[in-house]
Amino acid sequence: MTPMLWMTGNALDLYKELYELPQTAAKRQKRQLHENPYDVFPAAWQAYWEDTVLPNALKADAKLSVRMEWPTIWECKEVFEMLKSKSLEQGLIQTDEGYEAHMGVHPAYKLANRLTMQEYVCYLTRKVVRHLDAHGRAKAAPKTKSYAMDANTVEYPGIIRTSVGGTGNGDFDASQTLNSMT
């Protein structure tokens, strides 16, 4: 996706680009007579996941580790460039040449290792998908019965059990124990 494409052109082009299978994946017809329509979306999702989401999420991880910042949409290149252009139009910030003359460095250094919108979305998509997968696995896992877990527990040997009255086989009298402690 070209930068700033979301600001120009047909608004539906982004959605068409999103739902097209990448060229690395084998082109699939949306419906073939022998194919279950419920298999089409998982196949398209798997291709998108492997060819787009995971590589861009890895790029985002690398950039975030260098910047050591919390990922937000406000830190994306496209948002930064749009805010910069609006601020320049209103005269709120210096031009690039004025900034470079004043600070001694070109303002493009602020764009180093910033996420693109696509990388940011892929980073969050991977995070949500992992969460939902873990939730689904937890729901699908067989429930462990509490009595099965209790059977494997070992009681601490220092615990002494008593009956309600405080007398019985091997039990001690609580009043005697308290008196001996004082």
Image (spheres, rainbow, N blue to C red):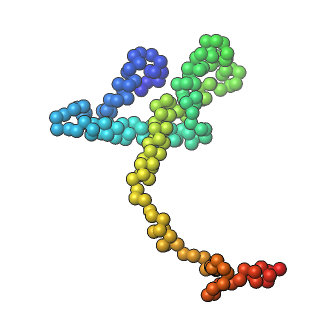
Q: Which residue lies furthest to the bottom in this view?
A: 169
The quadrant in which the N terminus is found is top left
Which residue does the image show at 58% across and 28% down from the upper left?
74
Q: Name the one closer to the observer, 136 or 176.
A: 176
Which residue does the image show at 40% across and 58% down from the upper left?
142
* Residue 169, position as x, y percentages in the image: 61, 87
Q: Which residue lies furthest to the right in this view?
A: 182
* Residue 42, position as x, y percentages in the image: 32, 40
Q: Which residue lies furthest to the left in this view?
A: 33
* Residue 40, position as x, y percentages in the image: 27, 36
* Residue 92, position as x, y percentages in the image: 67, 15
The quadrant in which the C terminus is found is bottom right
**Quadrant housing residue 156:** bottom right
**Quadrant housing residue 98:** top right
Which residue does the image show at 27% across and 39% down from the upper left?
39
Q: How many tags in the picture?
A: 0
Q: Residue furthest top?
A: 90
Q: In this view, does 130 lie to the left or right of 154?
A: left
Which residue does the image show at 58% across and 40% down from the upper left?
66
Q: In this view, does 62 lie above or below 148?
A: above
Q: Name the one closer to the observer, 46 or 156.
A: 156
Q: Can residue 149 be seen in this view?
A: yes
Q: Is residue 51 visible?
A: no
